Image (cartoon, grey):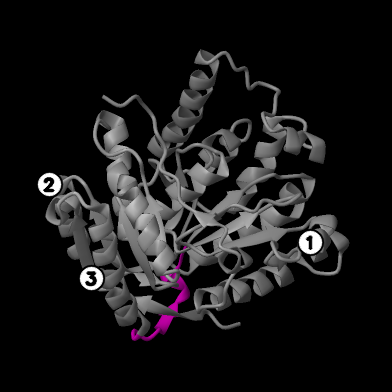
Amino acid sequence: MTQGFQGYRRTDGSVGVRNHLLILSTTGLTGPAARRVGMALPAAKVITTPYGSGVVGEDGALRDRMLLGFARHPNVGAVLLLSGKPPEAEAYRDQIVSTGRPVELLLLDDHGQDTLQITNAGIRAGAQLLRQLSQEPRESASLSELFLAAECGRSDPSSGLAANPLVGQIADHITSQGGRFIAGETMEWFGAEHHLEKRAVSQEVADAIRAAVTRRMDHAAAAGIDLIGNNPGPTNIAAGLTTLEEKSLGAVKKTGTGPIAGLVEHGQAPDGPGCWLMDQPFYAPESLSGLVAAGAQMVLFTTGPGNSFCSLLAPTVKISANVDTCARLPEQIDFDATGILLGAQSLAEATEALTAHILQTGSGALTFGEILSEGEEVISRVGASL
């Protein structure tokens, strides 16, 4: 089995599986202009946030971490930065430049507060960056240079029985080769957190896992929500998962069986190889974005009845072991894992096939989410603005 892929080597040492131009608006004032530039340059990826001023404390730190995580993502080859806040934007630019990526900064102040003028300048600057990116070649990279993330959404029994254990096999394989793997969705550890704690590399990591779940439980209780014995997703219940604990026992299988190297915050990059956990919200738009802001080049997303959400920056490989879903959603499911449940394919055979699929995707093969432009990134809020 081949263990390499063709990627884009960055000056900062990372390897991208895509070579995106990111149009990034960091203020609400420049969001519409960024979207207009994106319409003129459909090959680019556009991320905007309406929250610029007044975001402070933990919220401000999260916002900075997410924005810079997107801008410095391995799959981003260049950045067109639009902003109405010069000091902040200049600081962002300098941090992006330090990674070796080309950056063009457009400020409303330099264009007389004229959003049409900044749109025109953005189209011209973005066109030049796209041309430059198109001339860059892919180079050989090894499995150890992969950083994969795992997600599950709209799960059913087939997820816990086949699709998630399959992804867990990939987690073990990637980390055994020196790569990185990460999973989040903290509330989907509830009822199964003891399995994760036993795999922690230290008592400190085990305690952090337990504390993360407790914090989420306390947050729910403060809002009058009792999660004990309940599942907040009606789709999950309809599919046959009657409690959150039942869902969690299947969800944690995505992480494999190896050591848990540590727990990071939402959007925080792990500082070494191995299998990591992220303390974060568990709904797909937020959780996927946090995993990608941390630097994951690709997402393995398991689903039962189907889930169309994808990352904008990281190819999102949709995996299902539900026979009906794979037949009903042929333009959503990228990898059919039904053979495991049907007895037509062993877990080892499916792991080999999925590994080949991952490497092919890493070398440029498109996912259905990319083809259909399903991708988006979401920056979470945790507090009030000033």
**Real-space Cα separation, disc 2 to disc 3, in angstroms:** 19 Å
* Picture coordinates of residue 38, whole percent (x, y): 40, 63
Q: Residue at x 79, y 61 (%)?
A: 326
Q: Which amino acid does the dot numbered 2 rest on?
A: Pro
Q: Which label belongs to residue 82?
A: none
Q: What residue is shown with label 2?
A: 87
Q: Earlier in the sequence, mark 3 or mark 1?
A: 3
Q: Are marks 3 and 1 in contact (CB under 8 Å)?
A: no
Which amino acid, by three-letter code, is at mark 3? Pro
In reply to whether residue 42 is colored magenta, the answer given is: no
The image shows residue 62, relative to residue 74, as above or below, that is above
Report crowding for label 2: few under 14, some 14 to 19, many 20 or more residues within 10 A (C-alpha). few
- The first of marks 1 and 2 along the sequence is 2
Q: Please give the label number shown on residue 326.
A: 1
* Numbered circle sitting on residue 102: 3
Exactly how many numbered labels are in the figure? 3
Residue found 20% across the figure and 59% down from its top:
106
Q: Is residue 142 magenta?
A: yes
From the viewer's side, name the closer residue of 170 and 202.
170
3D distance between C-alphas at marks 3 and 1: 41 Å
Q: Nearer the viewer, mark 3 or mark 1?
A: 3
Image coords of residue 291 (percent x, y): 45, 51
Quick check: can you spot residue 270?
A: no
Give, as a single range, the part of the protein colored magenta: 135-147
